Image (cartoon, rainbow, N blue to C red):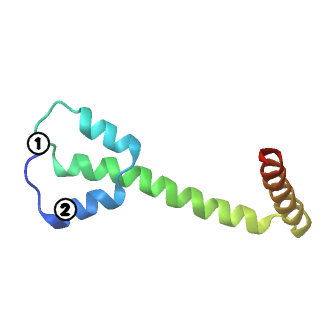
Amino acid sequence: MKKQSKGWLALISFGITDESFSIIATDPREDLPRAYVFGLITVPYIAWVSGTAAGVLIGESLPALFRIQYGNCALCNVCRFIDTRN
């Protein structure tokens, strides 16, 4: 990529992921269009935020008993993992 402004580089660095970096880094074009790069970093970001919001909403709709049991199960698995390492 040619020399870019600091603001543009800050935006790219905020949204870069492993996948978008690999696509940008392996693209044979010397100067990628800003719209192309912006699309590459925006689509995964929107999907990540949407998935997180969906997880929160779905998690809040679960019965309290299931949330407690799942949390305890996860905690027990962590404790078992730590115990087997010692």
> Closer to the camera, 67 or 77?
77
Residue drawn at x 35%, y 57% as measured from the top left:
15
Q: In this view, does 62 lie to the left or right of 45?
A: right
Looking at the picture, does residue 52 appear above or below residue 2?
Answer: below
Please name the residue that numbered disc 1 is placed on. Answer: 31
Q: In this view, does 52 lie to the left or right of 77?
A: left
Q: What element carries label 2?
A: helix
How far from the left and from the top, in percent, is residue 52? 58, 60
Structural distance between the alpha carbons of marks 2 and 1: 14 Å
Tell how many labels.
2
Check the image and name the residue furthest to the front: 86
Looking at the picture, does residue 30 appear above or below residue 9?
Answer: above
Hey, what amino acid is under mark 1? Answer: Asp
Hey, what amino acid is under mark 2? Answer: Trp
Residue drawn at x 63%, y 60% as measured from the top left:
54
Q: Is mark 1 on a helix, strand or loop?
A: loop
User: Do the CB atoms of the residues marked 2 and 1 lie less than 8 Å apart?
Assistant: no
Please name the residue that numbered disc 2 is placed on. Answer: 8
Position of the N terminus by quadrant: top left
Crowdedness near tag 2: few (<14), some (14–19) or many (≥20) residues, C-alpha within 10 Å = few
Residue drawn at x 19%, y 62% as measured from the top left:
8
Asked where in the image residue 69 lies, by quadrant, the reply is bottom right
> Closer to the camera, 83 or 19?
83
State which tag comes first along the sequence, 2 or 1.
2
Label at residue 78: none
